[in-house]
Image: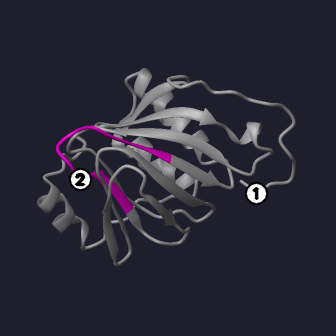
Amino acid sequence: MSAATAAATTVKVVQPGEGRRGELVPGIGVIFKIDGADSGGALAVVEHPFEVGGFVPPHVHHREDEFSIVLEGEIGFRSEGKEIVLGPGGYIVKPRGEVHAMWNAGLTPARMIEIISPAGFEELFRTVVDLTERGEAEMSKIVELANRYEVPMAEPEWFADVIERYQLSMPTS
């Protein structure tokens, strides 16, 4: 994925509740809102529902920054040595190059908006959703895809403590 080289050329309207929905890993979903094609490659926007106990495993982005806005519930974020739990209306910047993870830190379902800049990484989500819909989303395939998109998984020492403190559920497939 390269930096934005073109401008958006048409208006795109996404009404509340619209957008393709799918599952990324057990407990974490995605709803596609704005793709790179809609923004001339500048950014993509997706929504992530988090079930109680759900988490996004630690990983690092080498090509994009992520900006998250919590809509409902409580979502925990850890990026390198910084950890925070945000409620509705909370924002966080997760810069490229830092190992980070996200999880539902509360007792109710949670949702957040993810802005990805530059766009392109949303295609990884789309591919994982396709695999999930076909029943082929083994974790080994997801790890391989993540590496292809330069978003390798990581195993930081701090994550075992996060799993224990928040009683998170490990994906089983």
Which one is closest to the eye, mark 1 or mark 2? 2
Q: Answer with the quarter of the image where residue 29 lies.
A: top left
* Classed neighbour count for the residue bearing mark 1: other residues with Cα under 10 Å, few (<14), some (14–19), many (≥20): few
Q: Is residue 146 left or right of residue 106?
A: right
* Classed neighbour count for the residue bearing mark 2: other residues with Cα under 10 Å, few (<14), some (14–19), many (≥20): many
Nearest to the observer: residue 16 or residue 132: 16
Residue type, numbered disc 2: Ala
Magenta span main SS: strand
Residue found 47% across the figure and 49% down from its top: 144
User: Considering only vertical position in the picture, is 98 above or below 65?
Assistant: below
- Label 1, secondary structure: give it: loop
> Residue 105 got which mark?
2
Q: Which residues are magenta?
A: 101-113
User: Where residue 42 sits in the image (x, y, percent)?
Assistant: 74, 51
Residue found 43% across the figure and 22% down from its top: 133
Nearest to the observer: residue 3 or residue 113: 113
Residue found 71% across the figure and 42% down from its top: 36
User: Where residue 68 sits in the image (x, y, percent)?
Assistant: 49, 54
Residue found 18% across the figure and 50% down from its top: 168
- For the image, the number of numbered tags is 2
Q: Which residue is mark 1?
A: 2
Residue type, numbered disc 1: Ser
